[in-house]
Every structure is written in C-alpha cells, then in structure tokens.
Amino acid sequence: MMRLAPVIASVLMLTVMYSCRHVDDQRIPPAPVRLEFYGISEWNTYGAPGALNHRRYIKSERIPGDFPYTMLSQTGFGGILIVGDILGAPRAYDLSCPVECKADVRIVVDTEDSNAYCPCCHSIYDIFTNYGQPLSGPAHEYGYGLQKYYIGAGSQGEYMVVTR
C-alpha cells in the first residue's frame, strides 16, 4: 500500500497539470476604460452593490440613462459590465463577446442561470463565481474568457473606479 502512494500522487499531479487549460481573456481590442463613482451613495445608486447584482455601462448609448458620465468617462470596447460576485465583491468585464470581437456584439446577463451569454455565438460565461471563464460554446472550445477590468478605490478620493 505504501508503494502505491507515490504512484497515485504522480497520477493526480499529471491529471491536474494536463486538465488545466489556459484561458485567453485579452482578445478584446484595447480601448480606454474609466468609470468613476463618487461616494457610497453613488455606488449604491448606479453601481452593483451586493451579491449577484449587475449593471451595464455604454457611454455612446447613454446606458444607463441617468448615470452621471463625465468628459473623462470611457466604457471600453463594447461597454462595461459590473457585477457583484457571490460574496458581493465588485467585478468588471467588457461587454463584448471575445469570440465575436465586435463592439456591438455584447453579452447578456441571464439572471435565472446567473451567467452571461452571447446572443450570436451562444457561448456562456460564469460572471458571478469564476471571473468571466467560459462555460460552454465556442468560447469554451477556444478558451476565450471575458476581458476583465480593474475595479477598486480611486486615488483621488473616488469611491470606486473601473480602469483597464
């Protein structure tokens, strides 16, 4: 029995090494990203406070219509999706599907399944628990994850800032 332990450990390590796939989450063309929230009240009104909340931002289309965009606001290639993950921590992604790589082909949040999907290629992404990883469809087949953006406290006193 003692001789089997190293063999089992080796097999498990090889399985883990070869089952891990690299996910390319940098397929979306570079585009400026800057979205600012000043104070917790603005975050609670316009952000995604709390677990499983989400909000879309597309400056060129004024989505959301009442968001106080500024001259410095930039919403990436296809827009920004901000979500509160299952623990309520904020996460940000580009709305463009990495398979399609078109600014106007955007993922849609399915609140019933707690995932996001592309209406064109039908790829499904885990946005609340696994950081934009592909779950099925061409994105899973090719290993294309959602473009992630940094979200955190701002250096100029902003409550939350989304940047590239």
Image (cartoon, grey):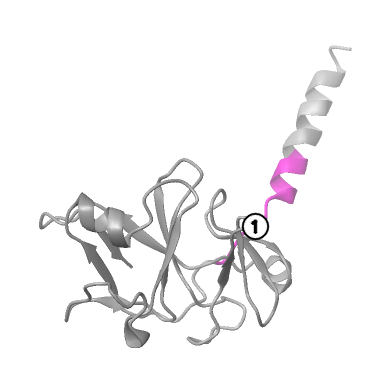
Amino acid type of the residue tagged 1 in the rendering: Glu
Residue 17 falls inside the magenta stretch: yes
Looking at the image, residue 164 sits to the left or right of residue 16; the answer is left
Number of marks drawn: 1
Picture quarter with the C terminus = bottom left
* 29 vs 34: above or below: below
Picture quarter with the N terminus = top right
Instruction: State the image quarter where residue 116 is shown.
Output: bottom right
Looking at the image, residue 116 sits to the left or right of residue 1; the answer is left
Instruction: State the image quarter where residue 93 is shown.
Output: bottom left
Q: Look at the numbered disc 1 and give the secondary structure of its residue.
A: loop
Return the residue at label 1: 112
* 132 vs 108: above or below: above
Image position, residue 10 (x, y; %): 77, 32
Image position, residue 111 (x, y; %): 59, 59
* Bounds of the magenta segment: 14-24
Image position, residue 57 (x, y; %): 37, 73
Q: Residue at x 33, y 82 (%)?
A: 62
Q: Residue furthest left?
A: 156
Image position, residue 158 (x, y; %): 16, 57
Residue 117 falls inside the magenta stretch: no
41 vs 74, nearest the viewer: 41
